[in-house]
Image: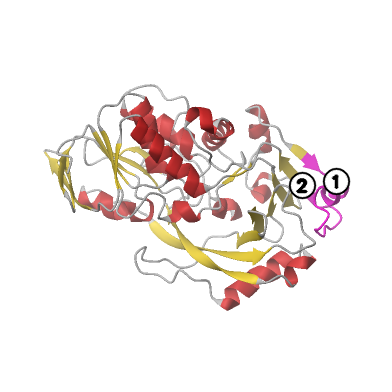
Amino acid sequence: MIGTADIVIVGGGVHGCSLAFQLAVAGAGSVVLLERSCVASGPTGQSGAMIRPLFDQRVYVELVIASTRMFEQWDQIVGGDAGFVQQGFLRITNSLDSAEIGGDLALTRLLGEPVEILDTAQLAELVPMANFRDGELGILFPRGGYADPYQATVDLAAAAVRHGAQILEETQVTGLRTKSGRMTGVETTDGLIATSVVVNCAGPWSDRIARMAGVELPIEVQPAPTCLFRRPREMATVGPVLSDGVHQVYLRAVGDAVYRAAHFGRAERTLDPDLFDRSVPPEQQQMLRDGIAQRYDAMRRTPSLGGFTAIYDMSPDGHPMVGQLEGADGFWSDCGWSGNGFAPAPAAGRALAALILGREPDVSLAGFSWPRTVDLGSRLYPDWIHR
């Protein structure tokens, strides 16, 4: 077991692995990432991994644009193949009102990202297998799409190791040590690591990790059910991610033969991240199918391939808690992304690494500090589930 480290990261999801990579590239010294299971074994591996610059707050748009540029050059920057399918992201809506679409189009355009507004006839041409009503609109982000969340995270982990970081899987954190209000070490199932900097990237378990340092984080763990369906013969998988704001459901391809789908909306119940039913009940699958079939007739008849329930680490206002936490000097947080964490993660890791090293980040994360110093507004509109 490693006896000392300059920085210890807790959690091997996309945020933990992105941070480990960025810290190692920046020459942060000895960086150790601890993962209780294996890399991307938690919610990251089940993420929809959809990428689109549609948000109300500038910081999200900046992070997603910066991450998109990384996905476009993944092999040169990180190494490997993140499975980035850049066929666009399409939001279907009745209105261009910001509250209706879950984002500020003027902000997206201001930051230089292309956006196309499609009328009903153009929608029908782009997505011929769907039914559209007069007056419906489409918002197309041509540079959007989706990635392979597992492969992207594994690539980040491998790149971190190549640059000198160490990743210890099947190593659970059992305690955090402090002295005179400062971090001094991390207790694990394999022994103690002395360190003055700990970064909590534990997602749905982040409140438990914080409590070990005497810090309370208001994380609520909520279910995010996803269903899988066989691709109907009539429907092509080539095309944009289909985000239906009218019927509150999204549909995207998984390879050439499968679609994955989920409803928008915040869950009404909470879960224990270690003890919950990971399946999706038949009645919930049928409800989702009914929602999809209102737009795509062929989805009424295609076989269901089951599904799974992932979990999200929800903060009170739906925004992440990123930065150094009050209560323990040297204790940092990168959690509470509330279903919007995958797309910003590569760039967020770079910005957070800069902050930890006392440097100026390329994207300011000041609004994500906890407790809040800036009112970001609520992120609990229907789009939160896109992750």
Q: Nearer the viewer, residue 81 or 246?
A: 81
In the displayed structure, would residue 329 be above or below residue 177?
Answer: above
Q: Looking at the image, which residue is at 51% across and 53% down?
A: 47
SS category of the residue bearing label 1: helix
**Which numbered disc covers residue 138?**
2
Residue 184: percent from left, percent from top: 15, 38
Q: Is residue 132 magenta?
A: yes
Other residues around mark 2 within 10 Å, as few (<14) / some (14–19) / many (≥20): many
Residue 18 shows up from this direction = no
Q: Is residue 361 left or right of residue 286?
A: left
Q: Amino acid at mark 2?
A: Gly
Residue 168: percent from left, percent from top: 28, 45
Q: Looking at the image, which residue is at 72% across and 58% down?
A: 246
**Which numbered disc covers residue 122?**
1
Q: Is residue 67 left or right of residue 371?
A: right
In the displayed structure, would residue 343 be above or below residue 224?
Answer: above
Residue 9: percent from left, percent from top: 30, 41
Other residues around mark 1 within 10 Å, as few (<14) / some (14–19) / many (≥20): few
Q: Is residue 336 magenta?
A: no
Range of residues picked out in magenta: 117-137
Q: Nearer the viewer, residue 274 or 180?
A: 274
N-term mark: 1 or 2: 1
Question: Which of the 4 image quadrants contains residue 366?
Answer: top left
SS category of the residue bearing label 2: strand
Q: Is residue 347 left or right of residue 196?
A: right
What is the basis of the colouring in this image? secondary structure
**Contact between labelled residues 2 and 1, with CB atoms less than 8 Å apart:** yes
